[in-house]
Image: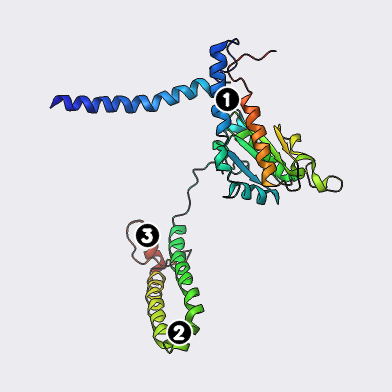
Amino acid sequence: MGLLEDKFEDNIIVASFDKILSWARSTSPWFFQFGLACCAIELMATGASRHDLSRIGMIPRSSPRQADVMIVAGTVTMKMALRIKKLYEQMADPKYVISMGSCATSGGPYWQYGYHVLKGVDIVVPVDVYVPGCPPRPESLIEGLIKLQEKILNERPLTKKAA
Amino acid sequence: MYRDFGTIFVFILLGIILVYIPLLIQKLVAPSNPSWDKLSTYECGEEPEGSAWVRFNIRYYTIALIFLIFDVEVVLLFPWAVIFQDFIKEGNGMLVFIEMAIFLFILIVGLAYVWQKTDLDWVKRKIAFPSGRYDNQLTEDRK
């Protein structure tokens, strides 16, 4: 944990700093592109000029060291699951995960007979927002991202957590 | 005049402050959860194998350089070959052919040069200009 994180009782000064911090974090969640299957095409479309992810402060990063949000877009195979876990561990805190599409959420079409598919990426990494769809349209991905921003906004980084 | 140095001093001070204040803020605010996985080398999700400080054989560089020459040559040859038909129709076929032949000739001279220098051989049998440590080897060969 950081030097000031979870160290203070709740009062108006701490709450204000909390607000500034969580606002700063929520308005620039750079995402780590984890395109695994056809959802990656929708992810690219979301990042491109028509839907333009940059306007909500999201820039695609290719390295986990620079990313805050990992968008798992596509079918997570058993082989890839180990890599997802490793890359999630290599991301800098605070880190969030978006499970995009039904494959990443539950295995999707491979749920019954997909011997090689992980039945939900939440088995290996903690997921913050699930985006349904097969694949989800850019609009639904953007809604998921805005939900994530709301979640980050409501965080209280400096305040002591109730045990 | 000395007061001008004062300006420089202020700039240096500002430079130091502007570097260290963000570092201080991130030290205070940013969460830090170091773990073995996080501190390990980023290798696109793979387990890093050995050290990154591996020494490559210096001979790879010569091979890479020679490859690069002919790589660029192919890049130029492809569009030339596609448009060549059009030039024949216009009656300039021979001219364009000779131009490309000159270009290839220059590169082939280069190839002949590296060939003569034995840079194409991975295992060097003949040392072109022996000196120092190779002197003995040469005399042994001659025996």
Amino acid beneath label 2: Phe
Q: Position of residue A68 (x, y in %)?
A: 59, 34
Q: Position of residue A125 (x, y in %)?
A: 71, 34
Q: Where is residue A159 in the image (x, y as percent from the top left)?
A: 60, 15
Q: In this view, does B95 lie above or below A4?
A: below
Do the dots labelled 1 and 3 sit on one chain? Answer: no
Task: Return the residue at label 1.
Answer: A22
Q: In this view, does B118 lie above or below A155?
A: below
Task: Judge by depth and name the residue closer to the eye, A128 or B107.
Answer: A128
Q: Is residue A118 left or right of residue A50?
A: right
For image coordinates 52% across by 22% down, the residue present is B29
The secondary element bearing badge 3 is classed as: helix
Task: Return the residue at label 3.
Answer: B134
Q: In this view, does A99 lie to the left or right of A158?
A: right
Task: Judge by depth and name the residue closer to the eye, A3 or B107.
Answer: A3
For image coordinates 58% across by 49% down, the residue present is A48
State which mark lies toward you, 1 or 2: 1
Amino acid beneath label 1: Ser
The secondary element bearing badge 1 is classed as: helix
Badge 2 sits on which subunit?
B
Q: Where is residue B75 in the image (x, y as percent from the top left)?
A: 48, 69
Mark 2 or 3, nearer chain start: 2
Circle on res. A113? none
- Indicate the quadrant containing the N terminus of chain A: top left, top right, bottom left or bottom right: top right
**Callout 1 touching callout 3 (CB < 8 Å):** no
Image quarter of residue B117: bottom left
Badge 1 sits on which subunit?
A
The secondary element bearing badge 2 is classed as: helix
